Image (cartoon, rainbow, N blue to C red):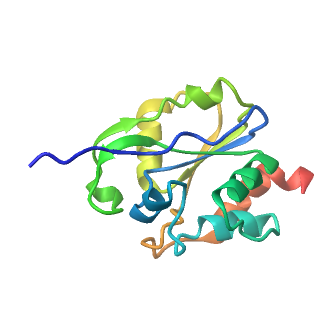
Amino acid sequence: MHVQKKQGFAPVFDGNSRVLILGSFPSVKSREIAFYYGNKQNRFWRLICGYFGEEIPETTAGKKAFLARRNIALWDMVTACEIEGSSDSSVKNAEVADLFEVLNHAKIEKILLNGALAYQLFVERYANLSVPYQKLPSTSPANPRFDETVWRKALDEIYITDR
């Protein structure tokens, strides 16, 4: 049986983006709403908005405005793949993002990798980039070892001077 490839999302960024956060691939719930981190149990929006002391925007437009205001670019390492449900371990025949679509148009100072698959694919393809990068614990509800302090320290390295 041939499984149809599922498509991810376009990157969200502008010329002022300073940090690029890369996930693996959108979950089922994210694909349903057609935007990043759509599963309410995922810690991403709670973490990132909480870091800046802001409420989580209700709408996709509000989330895009938040990202722009905070100079955050958002994308996934996998732009298309075969996947069962939302499980990274089931990703097959992955098409990997061309990060230069963002890097050539934004002032990215640091790349944060949300979870093991994002990190693995990044290192396979982009380990020689001059932009510093860091593997962070996945914000997925499936990750029992999530540690918010690691994320906060990584964000502090970028934003502490202008918070």
Quarter assignment of residue 75:
top right
- Relative height, residue 128 to residue 150 (above, below): above
- Relative height, residue 40 to residue 80 (above, below): below
Of all residues, the one furthest to the top in this rendering is 104
Of all residues, the one furthest to the right in this rendering is 162
Which residue is at a point 50% across and 60% down the rendered structure image? 33
Which residue is at a point 65% across and 33% down the rendered structure image? 131
Residue in front for this viewpoint, 114 or 130: 114
Residue 17 picture location, percent across and down:
74, 39
Residue 162 picture location, percent across and down:
91, 51
Residue in front for this viewpoint, 68 or 120: 68
Residue 6 picture location, percent across and down:
33, 47
Of all residues, the one furthest to the left in this rendering is 1
Residue in front for this viewpoint, 2 or 154: 2
Quadrant into which the C terminus falls: bottom right
Report the number of numbered marks.
0
Residue 3 picture location, percent across and down:
18, 48
Side (left or right) of 111 relative to 9: right
Which residue is at a point 62% across and 31% down the rendered structure image? 102
Which residue is at a point 35% across and 57% down the rendered structure image? 88
